[in-house]
Amino acid sequence: MRLNRYLAAAGLGSRRSVEAIILEGRVRINGRYVEDLGTVVNPGDVVKVGNRVVQVQEVIHAVLYKPRGFLCTASDERERRTIFDLLPPDWPRVYHVGRLDMESEGLLVVTNDGDLSMALTHPKFKIEKEYEVTLDKPFNPDHRDKLLRGFHIEGGRAKMEEVDIISPNKLRVVLAQGIKRQIRIMMYECGYEVENLRRVRIGSIWIDKLRAGMWRMLSPKDVADLKAGRSARRREESHAPLPREEVIRPSSAAKEAPTRGSRPQTRRSADSAGARPERPWRRTERSSTPRRAPRRDA
């Protein structure tokens, strides 16, 4: 196995990120420092990064239904709940691919496979992500073309691939970008506030029967489809319903997740007929000083 692939499989990051570790001369094989990216690791070789022996870990490919109120981070200085509180403690180290902000919910890939992470995040692959978006007021169909054409926001030029109206206040939105808080910002620029945001699909993988706090392993076909950039463009093209035994029950942390009624309150514009809403304010636990939102991200 090539050295960069070996280090990625050992959980040190993607193949591209571990190349920096090799070029910095921090890797030894059988006591000899190596800086050649083409170096091959043979069975029985002892590989060290610094003073740490690294070994190939079990490869995890899973999807998690992230509940509202959980952070996409490995740790939080304020000791708030994170998505890793929902995963088995005996797993090797895994990473979340992409993110959902604290107020959003839905499908999230967790893995230690650097190749899968690269396929899902590199802009050239344009992996589709589908969302159900609930707005604070009825959507004006005249805004659909603006969202599809796109416009500049902080973080770059943002556009939506598909916008379908499910009900007056609810949309189906498809993105092929990963700009931070993209949907919330684009909707704000059109005069709406997002009351609920739920990711229901990544590429060809649907949320199916997963409920908040549940996770399941991806099948080899699922992984191959994601790495190939395949997408199920319509719900009827998805896989058959998930067998009940493949769904893992949520941990106790998920059962304590905030309900929809517990989300932070936001201020609204006095003119709800069509004026741009006032930016929402949030208060932190540390300070009573309000800070502005939204930040960027889908």
Image (tube, grey):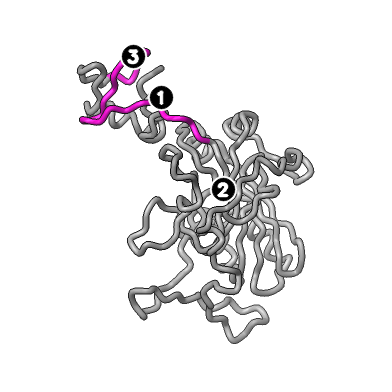
Q: Which residues are magenta?
A: 36-60
Q: Nearer the viewer, residue 96 or 20?
A: 96
The picture quadrant where one finds residue 17 is top left
Q: Which residue is mark 3?
A: 44
The picture quadrant where one finds residue 168 is bottom right
State the separation of the CA atoms marked 3 and 2.
Answer: 35 Å
Q: Quadrant of the N terminus?
A: top left
Question: Which residue occupies 44% across, 45% down?
Answer: 89
Earlier residue among tags 2 and 1: 1
Instruction: Let me know if residue 240 appears in the view.
Output: yes
> In the rendered structure, which amino acid carries the disc numbered 2?
Leu
Please state the horizontal and vertical placement of residue 8, each as a whole percent of the image.
40, 30
- Mark nearer the viewer, 2 or 1: 2
Lateral position of residue 200 relative to residue 117, left or right = right
> In the rendered structure, which amino acid carries the disc numbered 3?
Gly
Mark 3, other Cα within 10 Å: few <14 / some 14–19 / many ≥20: few
Please state the horizontal and vertical placement of residue 165, each as a whole percent of the image.
75, 61
The label number, if any, that marks residue 291 in the structure image? none
Lateral position of residue 133 relative to residue 112, left or right = right
Question: Which residue occupies 20% across, 18% down?
Answer: 31
Residue 44 painted magenta: yes
Task: Say which element carries label 2.
Answer: strand
Q: Which residue is mark 1?
A: 5
Label 3–label 2 contact, CB within 8 A:
no
Question: Which residue occupies 24% across, 22% down?
Answer: 28
Q: Is residue 226 above or below residue 289?
A: above
Q: Is residue 240 above or below residue 271?
A: above
The picture quadrant where one finds residue 44 is top left
Residue 56 painted magenta: yes
Earlier residue among tags 3 and 1: 1
The label number, if any, that marks residue 64 in the structure image? 2
